Image: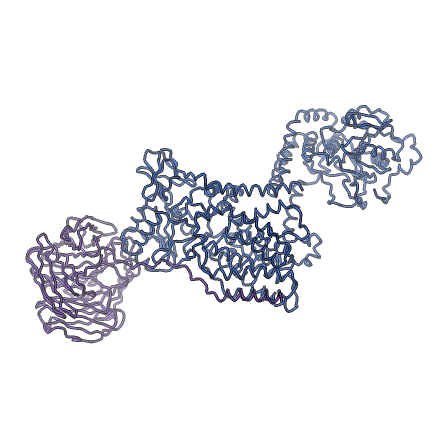
Amino acid sequence: MFPRMTDGSTPLIAEETTNGAPPSTPKIKVVVTLVEGADLEAALATVERQVYDSVEEVMVVGDPAVEVPDGVGRSLTLEEAIASTSDQVDYLWILHSDARPRPDALAALVSELERNEASLGGSKLLVAGTRDELESVGSATDVFGEPFSGLDEGEIDLQQYDVVREVAFVSSVSMLVRRDLAQGLQGLDVLLEPVAAGLDFSQRVRLAGGRVITVPSSEVYHQGRCRQAGRGWREQAGRLRAMLKAYRLITLAWVIPFLLFVGLVYSLFNLVLLRWRPAARHAASWAWNIAHLPSTISARRRFNPVRAFGDEELFRFQARGSVRLRDLGAEVTDRLLFMFDDDKALARGTRRIWSSPGIWGALIAAALLMVAARSIFFTGVPNIGSSFAFEPPSVALSRFFGGWNDSGLGSPDPVHPSAGLTGLISFLWFGAEGAARVVMTIGLAILAVLGMGRLAGRLGLKGPGRYLSGLVLLAGPGTAAAIGAGSWLALGAASLVPWAVRSVFVHPSDPARGKLARFAWVIVWSLLLAAMSPVLVVVPLVSGLLARLLGDARSRVWLAMAGLGGVVVAIPFVLGDPGWVLETDRRLGLEVAELWPVLITGAVLPLLFVAEGIGRSALVGAMLSLSSLLLVRVPVGGPGIEEALLVTASFGTAIVVAAALDHLSFEPRRALAAVAAVAVLVLSVGSLAGGRLGLPPGDLNERFGFATTLAGEGGPGRILLLSVDRAPIPGEARSGPGLWYRLIDGSGMTQDEVWLPDPRPGDDKLGEAIEQMASGSNLRPGETLAEFSVDWVVIDGPESYLDEVLAVQLDLVPTPLDPEARVYENPGALPMAAGAGSIWARDGAGFAGDRTSDRIRLSVSADPGWSPDPTAADWAVSVSGEEGDARYQPDPVLLVIPIAAVGLLGLALGAIVGRRARR
Amino acid sequence: MKELARTLLVVALAAGGLAVPALDPPQTAPAAAVDTPAMAVCAIEEGSGRSTTVSVASTVDGPGTLTAFAAGSAVGHVDFETGEFGASSIAIADVAAVGVGGALLELPVSSSAAASVVAGAGSLSIDTCPTESGRDLILGGGSTLSDQRFEVQLMNPYAGEAIVTFVVQSDAGLESNSLLDSVIIPARATVLVDLAEILPGREWMTVAIEVDTGGVLAVGRLGVGTDSAVWDAVAPAQEWFVPVPHGLESRQVVIAAGDSDVEYQVDFYGPDGVVEASETGEITARGQAVVDVGAVTPIASAIRVVTTGPVGAFLRITNATAVALTSGSTMPASGLLLPGAGSIPGGSGWITLLNPGLEDVSVEVTTVRSASETLVVAVPAGEVVEVVVARDRALGYTINGNGPLVASWSTAIGGSIAVGLAAPIADG
C-alpha cells in the first residue's frame, strides 16, 4: 500500500471521534465474508485498525472450517448473520476478506450515510498492489443490469471521482447498510457472486425507498480474489436474477426479449472473433436462471411487500442503451482503427494523427480502394472472364466434397478448391451467395491493402507506402493482367498472399511466444491461399528463404515449410487435372508491359545503397517480381503456374513500393526510388479506374439470360459459345478448327465452371460435331448438337467464317437476342434430363422430376457414380426414373483429402481459438 | 561489394525479363477448309400449265431428301435414293403444290448435282441448281423490254432470314429504286423481284445481288413469249468458259462486270480451233459486253473470257419465240454431271463438250438409266465436240474424261429451247 493524500472529503466523524464516539454515534456490526484464498487475519487486522470505535461486533461468515480469533463471531451464512444482529446495531458493514480498508474507511462510510440519510453506501475500491488503480467508485448499469463504471482500464485514482453521489449499485466488497433494512431485505442473495449480489441488494434497497450512495472517502484496497474465484457466467447469471427479482412484470416483458437479442448479437460478434466464451456464458446464465427460477419467484414474492417505488426509480440511475453493445461498438472501432493504425496514432490523439507515417497512406489507399470498387457496390461483381456467380452453398460444398463437376459436359474430376471456400463463405453469409460474392470481393480487396500494410509493418516498414502498396498488389504488373482478363481468383489469391507471407515472419519483439498458434495461422492462411491459387503456396516459403538468405532474422523457415501443407486442399484438383499446372498451351498468354521491369528496377536499385533493412526488403520484393516476370515468359507450366507468377510479380512489386515509399526525403537515392515507386503506383491505380477492382466490364450471365427466360419444361440446357478470338470465351476454352469454344450452363455460368475438366468421350464427340459444323459440311448442326442439350449456339467476337457457315445451315435459328453476339436457337435440343415420356429439371447438383418407369437419359458424361442404376448411353448416362431423382455419389476415396483439408483447417482454427480463449 | 552483387542480380533479372520474348497468345487448332455441303437449291414452278421435275445425279448410290419450301416453312418433303445408277428424278407435283418456290435437296455426297427442268406448253427451261450461296452474286442477260418478263428469284432455304441489296445497271444507267434496297428473304422462303415491273423497258441489265445478312441463292427468270429461261446468278470470277451449242438462233455471251471497270479478252474455240484474244475490250463497272457467237458460226463452239476483275458470263440463246439462258463455268473438270439431261420426252438434245486444255481428251459420255450406254468421244485440245443425246429417255448423263472439260446440255422441243450447264464432280 502506498501513502495517499487526503482532502476535504475526509470524513467528519473520523476527525471528531479519534478519542472515542459520542453517545449518539451509530453502532456497527462488521460482517466479514470469507473469500477463498484471502488472508482472514489480515482482513480482521484492518478492521481492528479502524478509527471508528463503535464497532459492536465482528463476525465472520463462511466456511466453518476456517478458524477465527477469539472475540470474533461466526456464522455460516450472511442471511443468518444479518438475522442474528441485535437491534442495538445501526449499520452492518459487509466486507470481503480480500478487502483491505484504510483505517478511516468505516468512519467515512458512517459519516456520509448519516449525513446523506442514505441506506446503503459503498466504498471506493482500489486495486490492491497497484499505484491506486481504480476498481470501482459505485456503478451505473444499463437496463439489463450490465455494470457501467465509467472507468477506463487501468485508470489511476486522482480523486477525480471523489464526490458523494447516488449510484445504481455498489459492490458488496465493502458496503455499509442500515441494519433494519438489511434485515427487512433479508440480506444479500447467497446464490449470487459479489458484483451481482451488490447489484441485487442495491436495487432492492432503492426500490424499498433507500438511497444508495458511493462514498469515495472510504477507500478500500481490493485484492480481487473473489473475482478470480468467481466464474464469469455466474456473475452474468446473477445480474439476470437480480433483474428478474427487481423489475415489475411489465418491464420484464420488454427487457427480456431485448436482452436475448443483445446476447445473441454479442455472442455472434465474439464468435466471429473466434471467442466462444461469451456465447457459452450467455447460454449458461439462462440455463442457470431457468434452473433457479422457483427460488427467483420466491424471492420476488418476499420482496414485493417491501417495495415502495416502481422501476422508474431504478431507471434514473441507468445508462441509456446497452453497455454490451456499446462495448462491442467500441471494440469494432478499435479493431478497424488498428488495421490501419497499429502504431496507435489515433489513440494518441487527433492532433498527432499525421505524425503517424502509415495513417495518411492508409487513408489514401482506403479512399482509392473505395473508388476502385465503386461499380461493385452498385452493380455487383461482373460475370465475365473467369469471374462468375457462386453456386448455392450446399451445391458448392457438395462439389468440393467429391461431387459432380458440372463444367462442360460434366466430369467426376474434382472441382477447383475455391468452390469449397466460396461455398463456405456463402454458407456463413446466411446462404445468400450473391451478397456473399460482393462482400467477399470487397473484403478481399480490403484484405489486400491491410495485408500489405501489416506485412510491410512486420518487415519493419512504417512509411506511407505500406498501405498504398496494397493497390500495387491488386493492380500491379501481374494482377493487372490477370484480373484484367477476368480472373477473380487472382484478386483473391493476391489478397491472401501477404497474409500468408506475413505468417512466416515473426515480430522481432515477440519471437518466442505461441508457436502452436503461429503454426495454426500459417496453416490457415496457406489453406486459404491454396484454395484460391494452389501454386502460390510456395510463395511464403520462397519469400521466407530469400529474406533469410539476405539476413532477415524475422523469417522462420520451419513456419514456411509448414505452409506447404496448405496445398492439401488443392491436391484432388491438381491430380484430377495435372494439365492445369503442366500444359503451356492452356495458358491465357497474358502479356505484361515491358515498362514494369524497368520501373521496378528503378525503384529498387537506389534502395540497395540505403539502410540495410529497407534495402533487403526491397531486394526480396524485386527478386520475387522480376524473376516472376521473367519466368512467365518461359514456356513451362500451365495456367496455374501463369496465374501464380503473375500474382507473385505484383506481390514483389508491392513490397518494392512499400520499401521505396517508406521514408520520403530529398536524399537523392530515396527520392529516385520514390519517383519510380510513385510511377508504379500511378500505373497500378490507373488500371483500377474502371471501378471494378480491375475486373473487366460486362455480365455474360445477364447477356445470356435469354437461355433461362426461354427455357422449356426441363429448364435451360447449355449454350455453346464460339469465337475466333480467345478473349470472349469465359474461363477455360477448348480449341477447335480456327476457333475457341466451350459449353456454359444455360442457367448462368458459375464460378466452379471456369475450369474445364479433362476431356471425356462426350467432349471428343462434341469436338467432332463442332469441327463438322465449322467446316460447313453439316447442313443440320443443330441436330448434331441436340444430344449435348445445346439449346443455343452463340458466336461472340469478330465476324468470321463461322458466321458465314452458320448463315447457311438449316436448323439453328438466328435470333437477335444479343446486341454483340450472334445467337442461334437450337429448337431440337434434347433436355438435360429426359425419358420417353417425362422431362426432369436440374435440382441442386443433380436432377429431379416425376417418378417414371422410363429410364432417364442425363446429358452428362457417363460415370458409374450416378444413381440410381446407371448405364452408359453412348457418351452420356441413363438412370432409373423410378425414384424421381438422380444424384451423383462420389467415390468415398475422393472424400478423404477434402475432409483432411477441412480437418486441418478446423484444427488450426481450434488452436487459434484456444489461444485466444486463454487470453 | 554486397551492394554491387545485389545490383547485378537485379539488373540481370530485369534484363532477362526484357530479353526473353513474351509467349505467343494461345492458338486454335488449324482452321479446316470450309466445305460445301452436299446440297442444291432448285427453283421450282408448279401451275399455269408448267410443272417441274428435279433430277439428281450422283457418283454414289445414296439417300437424299427434297424439301419444298415457301413462305417460311417446308411445304413438302420427300426422301429419295440415287440408286445403283446414281440418279433420281422427282416430280414436284408429287411433293407439293407451291407455285413458284424453291426446293432444297440434301444430296448423298458432294459429288452430286441437281437440275430442275420446268416444262409447259410452249415452255421449257433447264437450270443446274446452284449449290452454294455467295456474299455477292451477279446476274446478266436479262432484259425488260416490252415482250420480256425478267424476274429475279431469291431462295433462302436456311434457318435465318437473308437481306440483300440489288445494284442494277442498265442501258439507262445505274438504277435507283427503294424496292431494290434491303430486300428481306425470310427463312425457308423465296422472293420474286419483278424487275420488269420495277424497271420496265430496259434493253439490258446487269444485276448485282449483295448479300447483307444470311445466305441466299438466286436465279434469273426471263420470259419471252410463252417460253421462259431460268439461270443461276453466279459469284463473279475472272475466268469463264462458256460452251455454245450449234444453232441458228441468236447465241450471245453476256459478260456482266462487277463493281469495277475491267478489261476483258475473249478466246474463241471455233471451227478453226482456238483463236486467242479474238475480242478484247473494256467494260465499265456494272456494265456489260456482249460476244455474238452466233454471228461468227452456227456450229458448236465455245469461248473463254478472261478479265482483269470479277465478272459473270452468261450464254443467251434467243429466237422470236423462245429463250434459253445459262451461266458459264469457272471450273473445267474431268468429271461432269448432267442431271436431267435426256429427260425431256420427245425432245432433241445435244451435249456440247469443250476441251480448254492443251491435251486431247478422251471422254466417256454415259447415259444414266437402267440400260446405260457409254459413248466414247475424243475432244481435241482447244476444240468443241457435240454429242447428240440418245433418243431414249434418261435420268441424266455423266461425263468422264482424262482431261479438263466444260460441258452443257441443250434441248429444243416444239418452239421452246433450253440449255443447262454440266456440274463438275466435286471430291467426296
Q: Colour of chain B?
A: purple
Q: Position of residue A201 (x, y in %)?
A: 75, 31
Residue B164 seen anywhere in this rendered image of the structure? yes
The tally of labels here is: 0
Q: Position of residue B12 (x, y in %)?
A: 54, 66
Quadrant of the image containing the C terminus of chain A: top right
Residue A351 occupies quadrant: bottom right
Residue A114 appears left or right of B92: right
Quadrant of the image containing the N terminus of chain A: top right
Residue A751 seen anywhere in this rendered image of the structure? no
* Front residue of this view, candidates B6 and A240: B6
Q: Position of residue A713 (x, y in %)?
A: 35, 41
Residue located 27% across and 56% down the image:
B185
Q: How is the image coloured?
A: by chain
Work out whether A264 lies above or below A304: below
Q: Colour of chain A?
A: blue
Residue A772 occupies quadrant: bottom left
Q: Position of residue B239 (x, y in %)?
A: 21, 69
* Front residue of this view, candidates A896 and A275: A896
Residue located 19% across and 56% down the image:
B112
Residue A802 appears left or right of A229: left
Extreme residue in the right direction? A19
